[in-house]
């Protein structure tokens, strides 16, 4: 007389397939998180470089309004583990007799996930 077996649970094959699916999902999520972290770091670098460039541009613009001379210069600023190099140049022109025109160029470069730079330019009318 045959006996009836009630089987409950999962087979070994089903468990292995489920494990592979979960592992692939976790690896995909981890890769996405890595990309997000890298993009956030790049964005923070651009923001910091922009703030450094605009601060120097404002400083030089105020200087040009009072007593500026043509010049080129550079400095470095390290923040959040990244070295930012700023270079700037002030050149003079004249639009009317006795009215000076100053062109200010500022460039900030840094190397974090690749070489990057931002540039700013302003024209200032001096005395």
Image: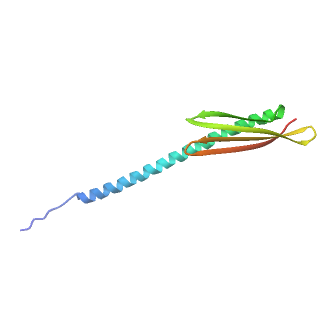
Residue 20 x %, y %? 33, 56
- The image quarter containing residue 50 is top right
Farthest residue toward the left?
1
Residue in the picture at 58% in, 42% down: 111
- The quadrant the N terminus occupies is bottom left
- The quadrant the C terminus occupies is top right
Residue 15 x %, y %? 27, 56
Farthest residue toward the bottom?
1
Residue 72 located left or right of residue 15: right
Residue 58 x %, y %? 74, 36
Residue in the picture at 59% in, 34% down: 79
Residue in the picture at 79% in, 32% down: 63
Q: Nearer the viewer, residue 68 or 58?
A: 68
Farthest residue toward the top?
67
Residue 22 located left or right of residue 31: left
Residue 112 located left or right of residue 51: left
Residue 72 in sight here? yes
- The image quarter containing residue 22 is bottom left
State how the image is colored: rainbow
Residue 90 x %, y %? 78, 38
Q: How many marks?
A: 0
Residue in the picture at 17% in, 61% down: 6
Residue 10 in sight here? no
Whether 16 is drawn above or below 108: the answer is below
Whether 24 is drawn above or below 50: the answer is below
């Amino acid at each position: 007389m045959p006996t009836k077996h009630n089987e409950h649970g999962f087979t070994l094959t089903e468990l292995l397939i489920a494990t592979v699916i979960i592992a692939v999902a976790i690896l995909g999520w981890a890769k996405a998180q890595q990309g997000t972290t890298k993009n956030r770091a790049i964005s923070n670098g651009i923001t910091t470089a922009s703030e450094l460039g605009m601060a120097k541009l404002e400083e030089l613009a105020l200087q040009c309004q009072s007593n500026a001379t043509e010049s080129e210069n550079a400095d470095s600023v390290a923040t959040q583990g990244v070295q930012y190099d700023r270079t700037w140049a002030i050149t003079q022109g004249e639009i009317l007799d006795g009215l000076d025109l100053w062109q200010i160029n500022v460039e900030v470069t840094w190397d974090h996930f690749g070489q990057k730079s931002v540039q700013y330019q302003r024209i200032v009318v001096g005395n």
